[in-house]
Image (tube, rainbow, N blue to C red):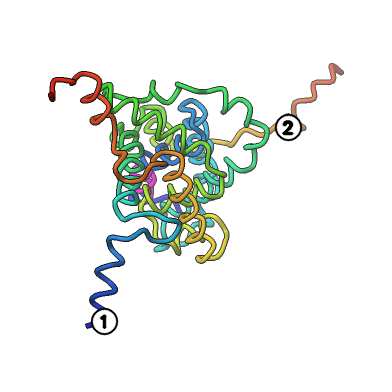
């Protein structure tokens, strides 16, 4: 379809989530913005192939995901090098405890196989249905469901080995600072 | 009756992969917190500019291609 003003606005509205998806995938803010830029250029160049009335965010996410995939291997070393880059993208610094927890979570996320990570992000963070996520990743709905389940299990194993009671530093902090209990 | 009972116990025991609902929701919460932190940054200028440019009569910007064949300046005059 032609690039109408409303379509242009819709594309613009999708940019924040495209960036969030790109950063979650690549773990690198600069790389993520390059990916988004490339995605937008591709989308605009191929806007005629967009079906009016179909899911625009899903279409844009598909382009971004395929771009990321296509040079993932080339970039892999670079991406792994980018530790700490993500923190620079934060507008507000979370409190120190929250920040540590946040870094730990991000680190665990990056340890997931790429298939599982993208499935978890699309369903768990971007808010796509299993069906949309399957179409974005070009696989069956059942495959997405099992990837999401495996991703959650692996994250839980990496982060909360001791189970649900291990809910953060409170207990430890109390034990260290305290001793005032007796 | 039996159904109710089994459903109730399901919600407190680990589901697939040994995940308790508590851990599942915690993972979901952290994932969204990380993601939404970027979403809240809005649209950076470079992208707003890029999309605005499409208003121009020139239409869509050209996607850069690698080494086009038109630029072989072979020096013959």
The mark lying in front, picked from 2 and 1, is 1
Vertical order, A73 against A11 (above or below): above
Q: Position of residue B34 (x, y in %)?
A: 35, 36
Chain to which the residue tagged by mark 2 belongs: B
Is A118 covered by the magenta stretch? Answer: no
Chain to which the residue tagged by mark 1 belongs: B
- The residue that mark 1 highlights is B2
Q: Give the residue displayed 45% in from the left and 60% down from the top.
A: A132
- The residue that mark 2 highlights is B68
Q: Residue furthest right?
A: B76
Q: Give the residue displayed 29% in from the left and 51% down from the top.
A: B22
Q: Position of residue A128 (x, y in %)?
A: 39, 56
Q: Residue furthest bottom?
A: B1
The magenta segment is A7-14
Q: Main secondary structure of the magenta part?
A: helix
Q: Earlier in the sequence, mark 2 or mark 1?
A: 1
Q: Position of residue A136 (x, y in %)?
A: 51, 55
Q: Within 10 Å of the Cα at label 1, are there few (<14), some (14-19), or many (20+) other Cα atoms?
A: few
In the rendered image, residues at marks 2 and 1 fall on the same chain:
yes
Q: Give the residue displayed 42% in from the left and 62% down from the top.
A: A54
Vertical order, B40 against B17 (above or below): above
Q: Within 10 Å of the Cα at label 2, are there few (<14), some (14-19), or many (20+) other Cα atoms?
A: few
Residues at marks 2 and 1, CA–CA distance in whole angstroms = 71 Å
């Amino acid at each position: 379809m032609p690039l109408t003003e409303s379509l242009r606005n819709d594309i613009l509205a999708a940019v924040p989530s495209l960036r969030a998806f790109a950063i979650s995938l690549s773990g690198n803010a600069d790389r993520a913005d390059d990916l988004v830029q490339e995605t937008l250029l591709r989308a605009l160049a191929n806007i005629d192939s967009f079906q009016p009335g179909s899911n625009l965010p899903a279409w844009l996410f598909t382009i971004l995901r395929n771009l990321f995939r296509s040079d993932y291997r080339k970039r892999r070393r670079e991406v792994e090098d980018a530790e700490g880059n993500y923190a620079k993208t934060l507008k507000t610094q979370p409190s120190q405890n929250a920040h540590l927890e946040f870094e730990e979570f991000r680190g665990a996320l990056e340890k997931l196989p790429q298939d599982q990570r993208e499935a978890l992000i699309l369903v768990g963070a971007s808010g796509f249905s299993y069906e949309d996520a399957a179409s974005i990743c070009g696989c069956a709905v059942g495959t997405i469901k099992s990837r999401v389940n495996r991703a959650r299990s692996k994250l839980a194993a990496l982060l909360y080995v001791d189970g649900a009671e291990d809910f953060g530093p409170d207990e430890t902090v109390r034990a260290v600072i305290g001793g005032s209990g007796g | 009756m039996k159904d109710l009972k089994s459903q109730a116990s399901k919600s407190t025991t680990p589901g697939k992969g040994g995940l308790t609902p508590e851990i599942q929701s915690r993972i979901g919460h952290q994932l969204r917190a990380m993601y939404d932190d970027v979403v809240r940054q809005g649209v950076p200028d470079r992208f707003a500019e890029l999309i605005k440019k499409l208003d121009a009569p020139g239409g869509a910007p050209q996607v850069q291609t690698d080494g086009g064949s038109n630029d072989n300046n072979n020096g013959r005059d």
